[in-house]
Image (spheres, rainbow, N blue to C red):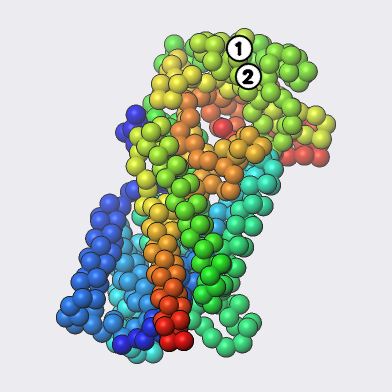
Amino acid sequence: MNIVDRYVASPIYRIEHPVALVLAAGLAAVAWFGWRRSARAASWGWVVSAGGLGAVDRLFVGLVAVSAVGNLGLAVEHADGAGVWLAVAAVAEAAVARWTLAGERWRGWAVAVLVTVLTVHLGLTVAGVTTDQVGLAVGLVQAAALTAVLRKVEGERLRRMAASTVAVGAVGFVTLAAWAGAVVAGEGGERLGDTPLPGVLLPRGEDRSPTDAEIAAAERLAEETVAAVAKFEDVEVAAAAGYQVDDMSGSQFHAENPVFKSDGVILDPQRPETLVYEPTPNGPVLLGALYEMEEVGVPGPAFGGPLTVWHAHDHLCVSLLPPGLAGFESPLGGCGVGAVSLPITNEMIHVWTLPDVPNRFGELDEGWLARYLAEVSPVVGPGSLSPP
Amino acid sequence: MFGMDERMSDLSELASLLLFLQGAIAAALTAEAAGGAMVFGAGGLGALLSAVGAASTFVLARRVRRRRAGALRWARRLQYGWMLTGVVDMGLSVALAGIGPAPTPVLTRLLLPASILVVVRRLQTGAAVAVTDAEVAA
């Protein structure tokens, strides 16, 4: 199954600028082969001039050149104000590479240019230009180039430590900018046509008005679910039914029932695969149920049309010790130590059973939930992100 | 032209820089793991181990600069770990979701560790040659 064809995902894990990728990867490959060739036959002008540089400086030139070409490619694919900024960044980076090769005084300018370019990237992100995998890779290359310059800083210990801290911060800054862009771009809802938040997959399609039959089907399932799961407000009853309610933690805790997850039955209000609780100091509050398909890639039944859009999750981190969900995969690649990446889950749909909840299906309005919990279980509020 | 010692010094600077960069990436992963643990209530063991890994990488970056034999050995082992976990994650992605690896994970999980491996091997080979030369001279 190819999830790119089937689902819309957050751009943070996707390639949306193929031109920039081909240009940057192409330059890197040409530079690599050219360099190896020149090592034997030292005959190319600019390559020969790089021969007088140390290995770190040569790496710096390569990184800045790749970043310049990458930014140029991104500029071509952004026919707006962002494109102009990216083109200016590309020219500035090309100038830095040239100064370095010419052996002129360049370190101060290099730091100024790279810090400015990284800052502009963050500014563009906050302004709504989302960072995809190509933009992130270019940002990482810029952070690496900045690290190469700053690691050369000499002098007193404090100065060197400050340079190292800035270098580490640059990588963190690039990652933070990517997350910020993805969250700003994410519309959070679960309607067809939305740009999902990181870690959420929505089926491709366009939103439309539901038919009367779809509204009736959605309301029927919601009412049946509210009635059927009311008994699980008592977690002892849920535990007796096979739901894993031990060690509740985090926000919107999902208590699975392993038997119901593989019983061949879906959308049965008497046997929802998962219950969702909000742990509070006064005890867990039942928020709703989650119905789940039994196989990856099998679409859930569209009984309520656009009112009941199923979703899946991608790039989740599953912890091995202790077993459980540990977060989302880094766009840099990988999870924390002791966790593996789960690339995709089955499709699923929430039904929220709280009284007067604004929407029975899809994303739970966290502001509303905070107010509700403040009434029924004072002292605590929900977290800021929803687990699947 | 560089002499042997200058060349080795140059390579150890490069290896140290690449390891430092890997440490910075590990530090970013640690911050993300800590954020995930807070939101999902997963406990902090993963984030703690990641922090230890990032700190160890920074220490290795410093020791590789001085060309310590033990540090070079551990630097190589660390790269095998990065590449193995990277291949597992990318293999799962292809097998379960049908999508190939994205550019950034290829950079951080394959190209960077492979580059460090190549440079460290050259450092180890150069160190062995230097020892042999010294023995011949003696």
**Is residue A111 shown to the viewer in this render?**
no
Query: Are the residues flagged by discs 1 and 2 in contact, CB closer than 8 Å?
Result: yes
Q: Is residue A78 positioned above or below A191 on the image? A: below
* Type of amino acid under label 2: Asn
Q: Which residue is drawn at 29% across and 81% down?
A: A50
The residue tagged 1 is A271
Q: Camera-side residue: A54 or A125?
A: A54
Q: Which of marks 1 and 2 is in front?
A: 2
The residue tagged 2 is A257
Question: Earlier along the polypeptide chain: callout 1 or callout 2?
Answer: 2
* Type of amino acid under label 1: Arg
Q: Mark 2 packing: few (<14 Cα in 10 Å), some, or many (20+)? A: many
Q: Camera-side residue: A232 or B21?
A: B21
Q: Is residue A375 positioned above or below B59 on the image? A: above
Q: Do labels 1 and 2 share a chain?
A: yes
**Is residue B126 shown to the viewer in this render?**
yes
- Disc 1 on helix, strand or loop? loop
